[in-house]
Image: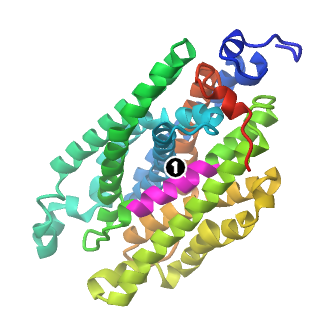
Amino acid sequence: MSSSSTMAPSLDAHHSPSVRLDQIHWESARSKRVAVSAFAVGVLGIAATLLGTTLLEPTQAFGSYLFAYMLFLSLGLGSLFFVLLHHITGSKWGVVVRRLAEASMSTLPLFALLFIPILVGMHHLYEWADPAEVAHDALLQEKSAYLNVPFFVIRAVLYFVFWTLLSIYLSRKSVQQDKGDGARILASLKTFSAPGMMIFGLTTTFAAFDWLMSLSPHWFSTIFGVYYFAGGIQGTLALLIVIAFLLQRSGLLAGVVTIEHYHDLGKLLFGFTVFFAYIAFSQYFLIWYANIPEETFWFLDRWGPWAGTSLALILMTFVLPFIVLLSRHAKRNLAPLLIAAIIVLIGRAIDIFWLVLPSLDHDHMGPQVGWITFSALLGIGGLYVGMLAWRLGKNPLIPVGDPFLRSSLGHENG
């Protein structure tokens, strides 16, 4: 559609400022091309990674797969949190970026399918899943009521059922809102999101316990779930900035997502950067202060040959984004904001790598980054991006029936 396109009738009907149809609809053919290309890369990457489980040392290959899986899953879960929080708080400024989060949230059912290789390789990943290991370890025997294969699978099924139901309900109601009766649907979304947030918190916490913390079953941290959650939200906010930028570079959302919305995303990104650092330091400080060998070994395993990774984690998830985002000027200028977002996303990858691989590095060889690491990232990342692009092209990029759309389009920071 040309730049002289008529205004969207649904937008006018809701008394919104003038927004052209070609600014809020990603052309179906273009979105499908992106989706198909990303899916193709994803399938090839997954195939190469699964082949690597037979060609390489299987623990390393499955560890790389788990790393990529938990990285992109955190973005899907973070997006679900963003949408739930948006509805609970009645956020007005966030209306124009909500569909971006909804598209990312809608990838969660895909991760149920992608979990199958983890089940196949769980005996290589989790020592508590090996009966021979449990038979010679008194502590694992004590934890076997929780850490056992059948219960592990049941819990995973429950997590995916809850996440899928939450994401489908929120997405469908959002699309229904475009067709009318936006105020009533908005009220039902607000009512639904409060218990949904509680379910999200519990399932995300225990999923982090099950799939990440139990890689070192002799170690535990009561705030590990909050650590994974905080990092996921930080990464999601960075992702929303990048997606909005890329869409605008493609000629979409111009005049819709403005510097005022970027400013708010920047403030939230800065806030969750500090929050993540606070949770990470709190976890470390309490274990360091108590100095109990049963707890300190986990951090000791992440020093020595892993010291460089640990320092890079601190630099990329806190120090650099904190410095870049500290000023108001940076949050209101796209170049530094985009740089901070990219740094955060790289930091998120380092963080999940740091959580997974040292627990599997029984010979203390340090980081082993090979082709299998990149094939896993391309595989799961490609499928995630493909699903994201498909969802973005399926519906308008903004909820045209939301009663707060006009307020969001004209939003200004004080």
Magenta residue check for 230? yes
Q: Disc 1 residue type? A: Ala
Q: Tell me: residue 345, above or below residue 106.
A: below
Q: What stretch is highlighted in magenta?
A: 226-238
Left or right, residue 57 beside residue 249: left
What residue is rendered at 37% in x and 40% in y? Answer: 194
Left or right, residue 4 beside residue 189: right
**Element on which disc 1 rests:** helix
What residue is rendered at 51% in x and 78% in y? Answer: 306
- The answer to which of 140 and 375 lies nearer the viewer is 140
Q: In the rendered picture of this protein, how many numbered marks are placed on residues?
A: 1
- Residue 258 percent across, percent down from the top left: 77, 39
Left or right, residue 82 beside residue 317: left
| Most common SS among magenta residues | helix
Magenta residue check for 96? no
Quadrant that contains the N terminus: top right
- The answer to which of 308 and 362 lies nearer the viewer is 308
Q: Quadrant of residue 19?
A: top right
